[in-house]
Amino acid sequence: MEPNGHQIISLVYEAKKDSKAADKLISDYMPFIKSETAKFLKRSPDISDDELSIAMFAFYEAINSYSKLRGSFLKFAALHIKNRLIDYYRKEKKNKSQISLDTPDDDKTNLIDKLQDNHNDYEENEIREATKQEIDELSSQMREFGVSMNDVADNSPRQQRTLDICRKAVVYAKNNPEILEDFLRTKRVPLAKLAVGADVERKSLERHRRYLVAVLLICTNGYEIMRGHIMQVLKGGEGK
């Protein structure tokens, strides 16, 4: 499906500017879109399934929001499709739960209790599986930088001051894509540029270099679940 990474990136960037090119890219990658939908449905999708339409639109959204800094486009698109389908499932279950919720069934259990249980179990399983996929992908990518998950856990900031320093460095990197490009190309944290650009102590960044590797990678790829959590922590300096 993706014989040449550079080729599909060129097609995606062309599709960003040309609606006809976007339509062609969606058409060419319908087998991929159907495959990702099938993973969610646990069956092959029918053309009439709402989930397939949502997956197609999610693929289109992925085209428009993709950057080469995010790594593989298809991995980015797959995660985008999965997240959109999870959102759709949540909304559907919420709407259904408003119909005859207090009507007891044969075993005297309120319908609302069963719907909530099924909804929660499914949602938790989907989120857990999506998170596991992100962690596995991140672990694999971090190995290219000589860093493991244990390294990150041991190297995470423990004090508010150092967390604030790391936050400033990450925000500066996010606002300056050339910094992230340099990071991905050299597989080294550009400590000097981050320290100068964010106006923070380089020694503090050096002490948390392995932690920064993980956070910067999350910022450059489609790790939506982890990025949301990390950005929340860094945004307000909450947690450790």
Image (spheres, rainbow, N blue to C red):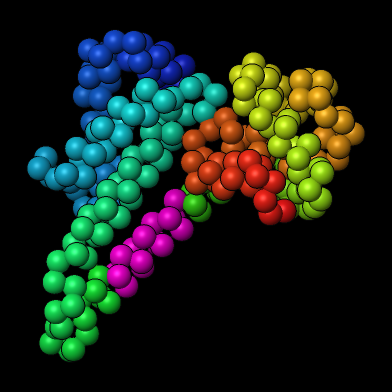
Question: In the figure, residue 177 lies in which quadrant?
Answer: top right
Q: Find residue 221 and report its horizontal and vertical position in percent.
A: 53, 33
Most frequent secondary structure within the magenta stretch: helix
Q: Find residue 147 and report its horizontal and vertical position in percent.
A: 73, 42
Left or right: residue 149 compared with residue 78: right
Q: Find residue 65 and report its horizontal and vertical position in percent.
A: 41, 25
In the depicted structure, whether residue 11 falls above or below residue 194: above
Which of 69 and 235 lies nearest the eye of the viewer? Answer: 235
Q: Specify the segment rendered in magenta.
A: 116-130
In the depicted structure, whether residue 209 falls above or below residue 21: below
Residue 189 covered by magenta stretch: no
Which of 130 and 111 lies nearest the eye of the viewer? Answer: 111
Residue 125 covered by magenta stretch: yes
Left or right: residue 234 compared with residue 124: right
Residue occupying the point 22% across, 85% down: 109
Question: In the figure, residue 171 lies in which quadrant?
Answer: top right
Residue occupying the point 21% across, 24% down: 27
